[in-house]
Image (cartoon, rainbow, N blue to C red):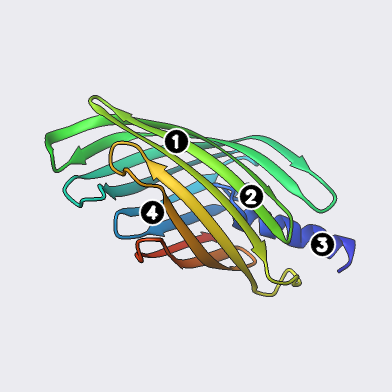
């Protein structure tokens, strides 16, 4: 692959890998769906480093007795980016705020959700880690996740590329286990889709689209 094509492919791969925002003037939509965690949000990049959006998160305890619904307005900031010849690394800051409701308390509470994430990717390897604090009066649902993946073979920037990605994640206060999910990821230009199953044999589906 020639250098301009490699650079373009790397940029598209990075955009579809881990970044919680797209390029300036773009809109990004993402979703994450499983039995105990369902999340969807959309944001708009006002600058190459800043994006504003809105989303909703539904989460449920392992025993399926307690649930939370969080509706948030969000701000995303690209804190730092390092570009190598065939690699890219990023650090991101995310801040969300809005009401949270639950089936074990009345009314709604104001929730604040700051978070940090970091990722490193090439056209063949992907690593990331993230943490987010979901805090409201009487509630502390802190979240942490780590991911690692690799592509099966190189492709040109306009072709679909399959990846194997493994994620481990945990949420305080609702889950007492670390969920591990291997997923097949398909990337094509400005989108990816992921399908997998965790160690409890529960299905998982994710998507990202930039337009």
Counting from the top left corner in percent of width and height, residue 47 is at: 62, 40
- Disc 1 to disc 2, C-alpha distance: 17 Å
User: Which residue was labeled with disc 3?
Assistant: 6
Choose the circle earlier in sequence order: 1 or 4.
4
> Closer to the observer: label 3 or label 1?
1
Circle 3: element type: helix
Is 34 left or right of 207, judged from the image as shown?
Answer: left
The answer to whether residue 211 of the structure is visible from this angle is no
Q: Which mark is residue 132?
A: 1
Choose the circle earlier in sequence order: 2 or 3.
3
User: Which residue was labeled with disc 2?
Assistant: 127
Q: Quadrant of the N terminus?
A: bottom right
Asked if the residues shown at circle 2 and circle 3 are in contact, with their CB atoms under 8 angstroms apart, the answer is no
Residue displayed at 26% across by 50% down: 62
- Disc 3 to disc 1, C-alpha distance: 33 Å
Residue displayed at 36% across by 46% down: 177
Circle 2: element type: strand
Instruction: Pick whichever, 75 or 84, lies toward us.
Output: 84
- Residue 91, relative to residue 208: is it above or below? above
User: Which residue was labeled with disc 4?
Assistant: 40
Q: Quadrant of the C terminus?
A: bottom right
- Residue 51, relative to residue 182: is it above or below? above
Choose the circle earlier in sequence order: 1 or 2.
2
Counting from the top left corner in percent of width and height, residue 39 is at: 36, 52
Answer few, some or many: residues within 10 Å of disc 3's Cα (few below 14, many 20 plus, some between 14 and 19). Answer: some
> Closer to the observer: label 1 or label 2?
2
Q: Which mark is residue 171?
A: none
Residue displayed at 52% across by 40% down: 130
Q: Quadrant of residue 112?
A: top left
Circle 1: element type: strand
Counting from the top left corner in percent of width and height, residue 128 is at: 60, 46
- Counting labels gives 4
């Amino acid at each position: 692959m020639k250098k301009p094509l490699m650079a373009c492919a790397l940029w598209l791969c990075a955009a579809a890998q881990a970044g919680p925002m797209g390029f300036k003037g773009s809109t990004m939509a993402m979703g994450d769906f499983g039995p105990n965690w369902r999340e969807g949000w959309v944001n708009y990049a006002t600058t190459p480093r800043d994006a504003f959006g809105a989303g909703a998160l539904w989460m449920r305890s392992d025993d399926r007795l307690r649930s939370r619904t969080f509706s948030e307005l969000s701000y995303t900031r690209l804190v730092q980016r390092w570009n190598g010849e065939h690699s890219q690394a990023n650090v991101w800051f995310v801040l969300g705020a809005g009401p949270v409701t639950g089936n074990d308390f009345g009314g709604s509470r104001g929730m604040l959700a700051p978070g940090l994430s970091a990722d490193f990717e090439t056209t063949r390897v992907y690593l990331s880690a993230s943490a987010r604090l979901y805090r409201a009066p009487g509630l502390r649902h802190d979240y942490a996740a780590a991911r690692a993946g690799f592509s099966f073979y190189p492709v040109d920037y306009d072709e679909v590329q399959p990846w194997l990605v493994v994620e481990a994640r945990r949420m305080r206060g609702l889950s007492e286990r670390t969920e591990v999910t291997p997923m097949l990821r398909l990337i094509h230009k400005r989108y990816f889709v992921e399908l997998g199953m965790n160690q409890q044999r529960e299905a998982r589906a994710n998507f990202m689209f930039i337009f």
